[in-house]
Image (cartoon, helix red, strand yellow):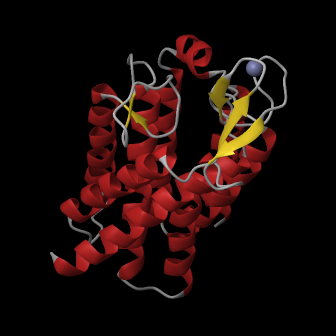
Amino acid sequence: MAVGGVLSAFVVIAARRTRTLSTSGAIAGALVGIISTAAGWSWGALLLAMFISATGLSKLGERRKAIRVGPVVAKGTQRDAGQVLANAGVYSAAALGYLLWPSSLWPAIGAGALAASASDTWATEVGTLASDPRSIISGKIVPPGTSGGITALGTAAGLAGALFIGAGVALANWQVPFAATALGGLAGALADSLLGATLQARRWCDLCAESTERLVHSCGNPTRHARGLRGFDNDLVNTVCSAVGAVVALLLSRAI
Ligand SMILES: [Zn+2]
């Protein structure tokens, strides 16, 4: 536990230095790091693999992505506590469950949750670099960064993210079938895109006549609620994505 705490502190300080995490994100990161490592080294290592891969991909074409998605997405490039918990909350809850009531159900839940978060994050970070995303529902071209917008490149990256965690789980020797982890991850990322295109709250800037997820638009004008469920933001959608991954992986791990 103490060693896990020290290691988590090192990772979080590095993340803060490279401006990967905001202050609240760093605190949340330390918390999920300590809980995961307490459940076992492999839990901590898998979380770290997800975090490092997401950070690496976020640096890919960073400036270009910031310019493209700045007017649309709600938050900047530094991940805050909401984003950290949306991506690692279900996973660390599974780690805590494993710690308190050891059972083979928890690794399946954790594997699916993490694979879904990785799949969605990889798809978003890589997909934003591709041109002309289309809405997963209507098929119409939407501005880069719009939730529910998908590209072939992003989808391929999402598949790679799910396989990456599937491979990590296999390497860690968890008793979770590779297919259960990978398919759980893909199901979660799919749920994320579907919810992003439908129920996720969308706002509108009257000044620019542009759709956005920001409360205050990049032009400085406050935005108003346009459609979707009020308050059902990107963080909540990501939490659901992770939960769907967990449930699908758990069911498949029992069935395979
Ligand atoms: Zn505006």
Image quarter for ligand 1 equals top right
Quadrant location of the N terminus? Answer: bottom right
Q: Does residue 7 appear anywhere in the picture?
A: no
Q: Position of residue 155 (x, y in %)?
A: 30, 36
Q: Residue at x 76, y 50 (%)?
A: 27
Number of disc labels: 0
Residue at figure coordinates x 33%, y 50% from the top left? 165
Q: Is residue 228 above or below residue 138?
A: below
Quadrant for residue 219, please give it: top right
Image coordinates of residue 102 in percent, x first then y, are 45, 85
User: Residue 202: horizontal and vertical position, in percent?
Assistant: 63, 41
Instruction: Give how far across and how far down residue 160 sits, in percent.
Output: 28, 39
| Residue 139 visible, this angle | yes
Q: Quarter-wise, where is residue 161 in the image?
A: top left
- Residue drawn at point x = 40 percent, y = 67 percent: 246
Identify the residue at horizontal 78%, vertical 38% (top origin): 224
